[in-house]
Image (spheres, grey):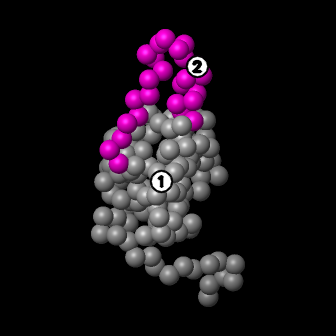
């Protein structure tokens, strides 16, 4: 008999570009205080919302660069051009954005291209259609190990 305090959700249909191992990796990703998740129902304006969020982040980044760079210097040029908003706010739960860990083949980590773009942006941004119960809950510790 199930406990009355435990909620059971019906299975969620996954896209063909998503696997159960990727969903597990999504749930286990250690969170950072600066992480942004754009969570929406499919076909409800996700890409539009990604553009709004990325525009705000890039404007903030450009302002910070300009404020800390002499006017006659090229050091303040912003190099974060992108072809598609998903370059910096990728779809969280698709297999292509995850790869096997170099230390173990059974653990998945974010793909190099995703990590590189997040590093260039200075924070991690994802879009997702996953339910709350399928999202990560642990924060990353300063030593690199997850904390609850």
Relative to the observer, which residue lies in front, 77 or 105? 77
Q: Nearer the viewer, residue 105 or 62?
A: 62
Q: Where is residue 4 in the image (x, y as percent from the top left)?
A: 69, 83
Residue on which disc 1 sits: 50
- Whether residue 26 is visible, yes or no, is no
Q: Which residue lies furthest to the front in this view?
A: 72
Residue 64 in view: yes
| Residue at point 34%, 70% (across, down) | 15
Query: Which quadrant is home to the N terminus?
Result: bottom right
Residue 30: % across, % down: 54, 48
Is 33 situated above or below 131?
A: above
* First to last magenta residue range: 60-84
Q: Position of residue 47 (x, y in %)?
A: 43, 58
Image x and y of residue 127, in percent: 46, 56
Image mark for residue 26: none
Residue sitting at 58 percent across and 27 percent down? 64
State which tag comes first along the sequence, 1 or 2. Answer: 1
**72, 83: nearer the viewer:** 72
Label of residue 68 in the image: 2
Report if the CB atoms under discs 1 and 2 are less than 8 Å apart.
Answer: no
- In the rendered image, residue 43 lying in the magenta stretch gets the answer no
* Structural distance between the alpha carbons of marks 1 and 2: 27 Å
Q: Which residue is drawn at 54% across and 79% down?
A: 9
Q: Is residue 55 left or right of residue 68?
A: left
Q: Most prominent secondary structure in the magenta stretch?
A: loop
Q: Is mark 1 on a helix, strand or loop?
A: helix
Q: In this view, does 80 lie to the left or right of 6?
A: left
């Amino acid at each position: 008999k199930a406990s009355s305090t435990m909620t059971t959700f019906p299975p969620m249909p996954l896209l063909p570009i998503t696997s159960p191992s990727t969903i597990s990796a999504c749930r286990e990703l250690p969170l950072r205080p600066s992480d942004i998740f754009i969570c929406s129902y499919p076909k409800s304006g996700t890409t539009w919302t990604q553009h709004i969020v990325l525009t705000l982040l890039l404007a903030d980044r450009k302002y910070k660069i300009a404020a800390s760079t002499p006017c006659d210097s090229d050091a303040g040029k912003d190099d974060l051009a992108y072809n598609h908003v998903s370059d910096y706010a990728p779809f969280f739960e698709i297999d292509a954005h995850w790869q096997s860990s170099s230390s173990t083949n059974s653990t998945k980590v974010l793909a190099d291209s995703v990590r590189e773009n997040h590093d260039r942006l200075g924070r991690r941004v994802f879009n997702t259609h996953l339910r709350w119960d399928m999202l990560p809950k642990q924060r990353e510790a300063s030593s690199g190990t997850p904390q609850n």
